[in-house]
Image: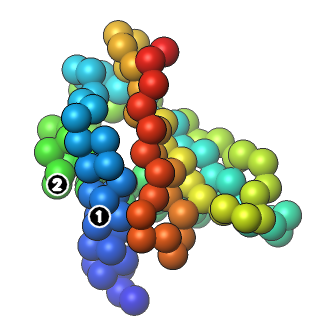
Amino acid sequence: MILTEAKEAYKELVCDAYFLLANKCLPPPPYKFCYTVYPGSARSFDLGNVLPVVGKFAEDALIALGVISDDSYKIIRSIEYRIGEIDRENPRVELEITSPFEGRINYAYTPGVRRNRLTSEPI
């Protein structure tokens, strides 16, 4: 799969997950994005090779869906990359979007799963 096709497939996944909570809206910017990878095994990998690509795809998808206006520093003030626990049953990357003003929205991407998990909760 070439990069453009992968990016389009990822956008569809983000779209599906976001509209699971269509009535939930993000508070106004600025935001902090925190990406956490939950690997499926103990095999070593480089966070810097995985999460920036996932992050760029997610941010571009959120812009295309009209969820955020752009991905400049005025909108996304900080980006954090984390490693979570090994999850052999559900390896994934989760995106947590927080605002200093209100609640947060979490999006979990699991490779190969058509419908992913999106939750919203107050801070």
Q: Amino acid at mark 1?
A: Lys
The percent coordinates of residue 14 (x first, y second) are 34, 57
30 to the left or right of 63: right
Classify mark 2: helix, strand or loop. Answer: helix
Q: Residue furthest right?
A: 42
Q: CA distance from mark 2 to mark 1?
A: 8 Å
Classify mark 1: helix, strand or loop. Answer: helix
Q: Report the residue at 49% width, 70% height from top.
A: 113
2 to the left or right of 68: right
Question: Taking the image as drawn, is residue 7 in sight?
Answer: no
The percent coordinates of residue 109 (x first, y second) are 49, 58
- Image height of 65 relative to 71, above or below: below
Q: Residue 49's mark?
A: none
Q: Evaluate if marks 2 and 1 touch, with contact meaning CB atoms under 8 Å apart.
A: yes
Q: Pick whichever, 100 or 70, lies toward us.
A: 100
The percent coordinates of residue 62 (x first, y second) are 26, 49
Q: Residue furthest bottom?
A: 1
The residue pinned by badge 2 equals 64
Q: Pick whichever, 37 or 102, lies toward us.
A: 102
Q: Report the residue at 65% width, 42% height from top.
A: 82
Q: Quadrant of the N terminus?
A: bottom left
Q: Report the residue at 79% width, 55% height from top.
A: 86
- Image height of 92 relative to 81, above or below: below
Q: Amino acid at mark 2?
A: Ala
Q: For label 1, count other residues whose C-alpha is less than 10 Å away and answer few (under 14), some (14-19) or many (20+).
A: many
Q: Residue 11's mark?
A: 1
